[in-house]
Every structure is written in C-alpha cells, then in structure tokens.
Image: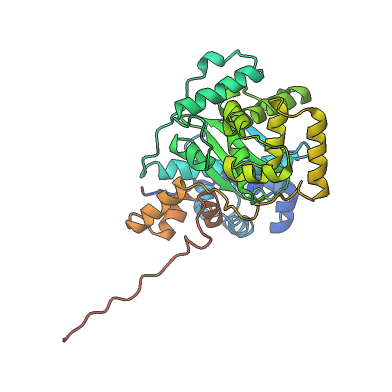
Amino acid sequence: MKVREEQQFNPKRLREARLVRGLSISNLADEIGVSKQAISQFELGDHTPKPETVMALINTLRFPKSFFYREFKEQYVGNTFFRANATATKKSKEIQLNKSLLGGYIFEYVSEYIEFPDLNLPDTSQNINLEWDNDSIESLAKQVREYWGIDDKPITNIVHLLERNGIMVFSVDTDSEKVDAFCQHRKGRPFIFLGNDKQSAFRRQFDGAHELGHVLMHKYIHNQDVLSREEFKNMESQANRFASALLMPAEAFAKTINSVSLLHFVDLKKYWNVSIAAMLYRCLDLKLIDESKYTSLVKQMSMKKMRTKEPLDDVFPLQKPVVFRKSILLLLENKIKNELQLIQEISVPQEYIEMLCNLDQGTLNHKEPEPTIRLIKG
C-alpha cells in the first residue's frame, strides 16, 4: 500500500502525539518555544504551524512527519476498561488510551496484507440486561471453556488462547505501576493491551482473563466514567470472578486442594498457572477455606515477603503476543516491505511499532542492502 502524504497539517494528530508523550499543552509550548495559545490553536485547527514549527514538533514529539499529515480511517473505540489501581490518574489513562490509537493504526495497516484469525467468541447477546451474580459468572466461564474446547484443563497461555480466537492483543509499556492492562470494544473485534511493566507470567494470566471478562460481560456499558465508585468496583469484582472461574474451574480446582499449606499452593501454581494469591482467594470464594484460614494464609505470605514477589515469579517466562510480531516479520522476510517503508507507511514511531507488536528493539532499524559482487573467473 502506497501512502500518499496529505499536504494539510492534521490537528488531531498533534493532540494524539502530545498525549502519547504525556505532555501538557504548557510542556509542549515550553519545549518548542511557542506560546500555550499557539499550541491550542494548532490542535483546534485555527492556525497551521509554520514549517520550522512543524520540524520542532517532530523533533520534540519524535513522531514521523507523515503522522502529522495523515487522515487515518476513523476508529470506533467503545468503552475502555482499565485494570488499574484506584489511584491511577486521568493523565495516566489518557496516555494509554492514545497509545491504543497507535495500535489501531497498526492493525489497519497490517490487515491489508495479513489474514487474522476469525473472531470466535460465544454469543452473549442474550445477556444484555443480565445482572451478573456469582452463579451467572461461573456459568459464563464454563460456557467459554466448553466453546473453546478447554474442558477442565489448565490454561497454560492465556495470550495465545485469546489470539487464536481472534482477539487483538498488544504489549504496552504503561510506564505506570497503577495500570496493568486494559481492553476496548472495537468495531469487528476487541483489542486487549497487556502491560509489560510487571514482568510476571502469573499476573499476566489473570490480567488477560480479567479483560476477557469485560469483553464478554460489559460490552454494553458505553461510558465507564458515568459509573459511581460502587458500580465501578462491582464491575471490577465481576471481571475478577470471571478470571478466577476461567482459570480455575470450580470442580477441577477443588479436587486439587489436598492441603492448605503455602508449600502445596506453590506446587499448584505450576499446575494452574495462576498466582498463590489468586488461588487463596478462589478457595475462599468456593468455601474451600473460611475467612479465618484465608486471613492466616495471607499473613503468612506477608511474613515470608511473598505478597509482592511470589515463588516461581522469576522462573516462568512472560506470555507474549505473537500475531502482530509474526505479521510484521512476514512482511519483512517476504520482502513485501522493508523497515523504512513500514515506519513511513504506518506513520507510527518505530519504538511504538516495536513495543505494541512485541518486536525486539531495533527490529525496524533500516538496513542498507549489501553490495553485490560476482565471480568473474573460476
């Protein structure tokens, strides 16, 4: 696909690039030596920056020039559900939301060359007005397992499971300890963004399952911001219950609880591929232990300094998305595109293409072709 660069500066792109970099209008104005009013006017489209100002914006925001002149297809982005600490700031969420737009631009470009797996989710349209309680959530998790043919087996890699069933999964550096993951309802298929900042395979298992819960249960909630604190907390509890039920199916999980010692849960962690903390909470939910025993085990974890870093956390490799990585490498290996073409035509900074597509840093460094030589005489 040959991208024709438009001659008109696009104010929407400037705002997106600024927010991706986490800069306020004042920050950006100070960086490039113009007034706050000037930046506001550029973003509103009231004024067009001069060529020298455009160069300053490019150098400061580190986006390709083509990005600021592109009119991408309008992205339908439904509600974005953040798996976030209650103290996550509006600014932090805004940064991640604008990074997700970059993921959409990559998807739009790559989908012209690559056929992605079909979206394969059970039909939940009949649940539009359902008040989710524990029983209905457990039933939904069981339905998903049956639909995907998992039965009662442990899920070893939630990321690959999501990708095989047509969900677009991206890696993202959230640069925040307060945002672990988030998902969006998009036209055609859901997008899930998994944070790279906490390198725990077991946390990622739960994050992926939690986001799938939002995808299946909360797609009809169109504006998360209008929810009360209690409603938001309840929605997060529902997604957590779904993640637990999906990763630890009730009957099969209960059969493996032969002891309630922490040592036993370390062994079970290798089998169920979930954290000890998640298993303890699941035991409480299923009434395999009472509140008193649960509290005692959590205190033991605290005494052993296992709350922040559990045994095996640094042993199991992080599950990484592969669909976009394979797609980009396929385009390169088959010489359909070279590195420079990909960056220019996607119009997204190299670092973000590599990050979102789970490519090794430097994969898209431009490589000059080596000179060709031939043997004259044998």
Q: Is residue 282 left or right of residue 361?
A: right
Position of residue 208 measured from the top left corner of the image (x, y, whole percent): 58, 38
Give the tally of numbered discs: 0
Q: Quadrant of the C terminus?
A: bottom left
Residue found at the far left of this picture: 378
Q: Is residue 157 left or right of residue 233?
A: left
Position of residue 225 measured from the top left corner of the image (x, y, whole percent): 71, 27
Residue 102 position (above or below residue 228): below
Q: How is the image coloured?
A: rainbow
Q: Is residue 300 left or right of residue 263?
A: right
Q: Is residue 122 left or right of residue 89?
A: left
Residue 46 in view in this figure: no
Q: What residue lies at 79% left-to-right and 40% top-to-bottom?
A: 298
Position of residue 37 measured from the top left corner of the image (x, y, whole percent): 73, 45
Residue 331 or 213: which is nearer the viewer? 213
Residue 141 or 354: which is nearer the viewer? 141
Position of residue 137 measured from the top left corner of the image (x, y, whole percent): 61, 21
Residue 233 position (above or below residue 266): above
Residue found at the far bottom of this picture: 377
Residue 353 or 300: which is nearer the viewer? 300
Q: What residue lies at 52% left-to-right and 19% top-to-bottom?
A: 124
Residue 345 or 296: which is nearer the viewer? 296
Residue 91 position (above or below residue 228): below
Residue 155 position (above or below residue 226): below
Q: What residue lies at 62% left-to-right and 33% top-to-bottom?
A: 210
Residue 30 in view in this figure: yes
